[in-house]
Image: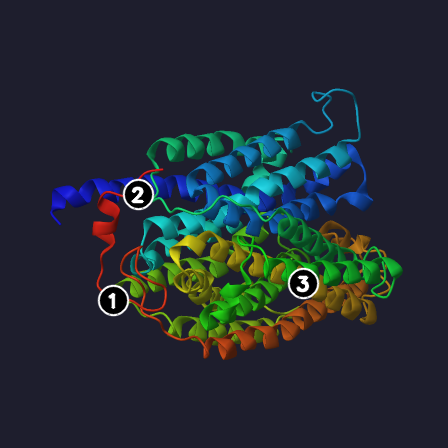
């Protein structure tokens, strides 16, 4: 391959990668921005008892749609489906910005409008996340894929830090509505860039959609998310509502499994799980989401209450965690590309992540910001070994025609794990806090506000801070076994050589790099 023939290919990938990074940043950035705008939204609309649904509706839409988007991409072509998901996300963003303004006709209930529009936005976001990973899988052979997925992991880390900072600035200086409107110009750039410059290889598949399976899966996932959202909060865990939803989830998922065994084009092929690597990495993704998203939600709470940081500064205090994740993700991606080996990384990641959780158990009232930053670096390093390596292994375990379904399943299990983690760790935190010396002072939850804490008498304030610190460290204690299980499961991963081109079989292939040949003149759809 001559230099002149190689250059256009590389330029095309870089241009497409820029569009994919913008799309991924939109999906990751949105929730982080909106979280800082929620108090202002509640102040305008009221509806404090419903405000958590502004987040839950988005998560629910994303989780339900992720495997469906993945399968649609396999059937109808990744490009058209991905551009459609961007369009739906931008449409939902515009509607969210107009919620309760009267621009949609009539006064209406602003909070309920916003919740409904967030669900629409979440449906599009599900396609963004799975689409980015699957498109990289279409363009780049597994041997080369680690480098690019490492870059995507870096964008995810940047979005998680930038979100609170951008959201705080927008809310303070513009309006909470711009937390949604800001998506429109960014998404428009990504849409134009990818529509005009992205050309993907074509794979022939019969166009049959398993609508019954999609409906059963959506019902089951929705019921699970409602159980984890409402359980212990809106309703008792043993209430008729929660038990009824649990039964509905179980029946729907059992019926889904029976349907998937009989249809010719299943929305989530159960045969994927007969592959040992895919089954193991799916379980690892679930545990990763459980430990990571569940525990990480409590770091800003610790920083703002116990350490006295502002909302904006708490975002800055997360930089050590994101820096560790960013650097390691990029290094690991390049190492995989160079050596073709990957099995050691999830093992190391599980071990380091466990150490990070153990260190975060030490958080107390007297822990300095420097100490907590060092603990977070360790956790971030562990996450860096795992985040994109897990997706790479999932994609390398399946044939190219199943790439979207595999990417969707990997994202789906991580998302479901995160939902369970947030629910379980939230219940653990609430129970420990209620049993602590701070329980009486915080019985109604109002005293958690950092400004209110500063107004308490010294002795009472110290008791409250001690109870908060102890309850948060208890969350990390419970996260330890889940993180440790990641390293144990990773031992069962079989190191199958990464395919050097896009048309080699998934059961092991020659490690020679054929990426440039495969990309030089891809068929266009």
Task: Identify the secondary structure beneath mark 1.
Answer: loop
Task: Identify the secondary structure beneath mark 2.
Answer: helix
In the rendered view, does 414 fall on the left or right side of 48? left
* Disc sitting over residue 227 in the figure: none
* Disc sitting over residue 14 in the figure: 2
> 173 or 420, which is in the foreground?
420
Mark 1 vs mark 2: in front? 1
| Residue 484 vertical placement versus 410 (above, below) | below
Residue position for label 3: 420
> 486 or 477, which is in the foreground?
486
The residue at the point 27 percent across, 60 percent down is 500
| Residue 89 vertical placement versus 396 (above, below) | above
Q: Say if mark 3 contacts mark 2, CB within 8 Å.
A: no
Q: Earlier in the sequence, mark 1 or mark 2?
A: 2
Provide residue 17's location: percent of width, then percent of height: 36, 44
> 77 or 42, which is in the foreground?
77
The residue at the point 73 percent across, 45 percent down is 53
Residue 467 picture quarter: bottom right
Mark 3 residue crowding within 10 angstroms, few (<14) / some (14–19) / many (20+): many
| Residue 382 vertical placement versus 513 (above, below) | below
Residue position for label 1: 510
Q: CA distance from mark 1 to mark 2?
A: 26 Å
Mark 3 vs mark 1: in front? 1
Q: Earlier in the sequence, mark 3 or mark 1?
A: 3
Task: Identify the secondary structure beneath mark 3.
Answer: helix
In the rendered view, does 342 fall on the left or right side of 339? right
Say if residue 80 shows up in the picture: yes
Provide residue 306's location: percent of width, then percent of height: 67, 61
Say if residue 375 shows up in the picture: no
């Amino acid at each position: 391959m001559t230099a002149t023939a190689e250059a256009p290919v590389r330029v095309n990938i870089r241009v497409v990668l820029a569009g994919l990074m913008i799309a991924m940043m939109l999906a990751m950035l949105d929730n982080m921005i909106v979280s800082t705008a929620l108090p202002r939204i509640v102040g305008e609309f009221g509806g404090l008892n419903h405000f958590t649904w502004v987040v839950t509706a988005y998560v629910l839409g994303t989780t339900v749609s992720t495997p469906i988007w993945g399968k649609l991409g396999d059937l109808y072509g990744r490009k058209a489906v991905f551009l459609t998901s961007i369009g739906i996300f931008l449409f939902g963003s515009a509607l969210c910005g107009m919620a309760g303004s009267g621009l949609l006709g009539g006064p209406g209930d602003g909070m309920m409008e916003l919740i409904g529009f967030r669900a629409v936005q979440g449906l599009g976001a599900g396609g963004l996340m799975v689409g980015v990973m699957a498109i990289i899988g279409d363009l780049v052979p597994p041997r080369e894929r680690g480098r690019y997925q490492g870059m995507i992991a870096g964008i995810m880390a940047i979005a998680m830090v930038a979100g609170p900072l951008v959201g705080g600035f927008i809310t303070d200086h513009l309006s909470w509505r711009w937390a949604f409107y800001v998506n429109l110009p960014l998404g428009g750039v990504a849409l134009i860039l990818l529509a005009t410059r992205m050309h993907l290889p074509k794979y022939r598949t019969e166009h049959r959609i398993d609508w019954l399976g999609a409906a059963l899966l959506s019902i089951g996932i929705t019921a699970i998310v409602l159980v984890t959202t409402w359980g212990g909060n809106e309703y008792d865990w043993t209430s008729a509502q929660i038990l009824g939803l649990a039964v509905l989830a179980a029946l729907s998922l059992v019926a889904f499994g029976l349907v998937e065994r009989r249809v010719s084009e299943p929305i989530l092929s159960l045969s994927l799980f007969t592959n040992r690597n895919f089954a193991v990495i799916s379980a690892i993704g679930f545990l990763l989401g459980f430990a990571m998203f569940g525990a990480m939600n409590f770091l800003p709470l610790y920083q703002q209450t116990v350490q006295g940081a502002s909302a904006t500064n708490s975002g800055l205090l997360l930089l050590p965690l994101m820096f560790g994740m960013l650097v390691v993700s990029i290094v690991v991606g390049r190492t995989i590309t160079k050596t073709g080996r990957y099995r050691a990384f999830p093992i190391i990641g599980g071990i380091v992540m466990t150490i990070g959780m153990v260190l975060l158990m030490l958080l107390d009232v007297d822990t300095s910001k420097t100490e907590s930053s060092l603990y977070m670096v360790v956790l971030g390093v562990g996450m860096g070994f795992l985040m994109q390596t897990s997706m790479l292994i999932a994609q390398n375990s399946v044939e190219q025609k199943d790439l979207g379904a595999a990417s969707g399943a990997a994202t789906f299990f991580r998302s479901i794990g995160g939902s369970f983690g947030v629910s379980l760790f939230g219940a653990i935190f609430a129970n420990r806090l209620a049993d602590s010396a701070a329980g009486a002072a915080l019985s109604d939850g109002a005293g958690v506000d950092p400004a209110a804490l500063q107004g308490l008498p010294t002795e009472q304030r110290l008791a409250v801070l001690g109870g908060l610190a102890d309850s948060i460290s208890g969350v990390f204690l419970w996260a330890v076994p889940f993180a440790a299980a990641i390293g144990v499961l990773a031992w069962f991963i079989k190191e199958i050589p990464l395919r050097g081109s896009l048309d080699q079989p998934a059961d092991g292939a020659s490690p020679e790099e054929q990426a440039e040949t495969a990309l030089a003149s891809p068929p266009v759809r």
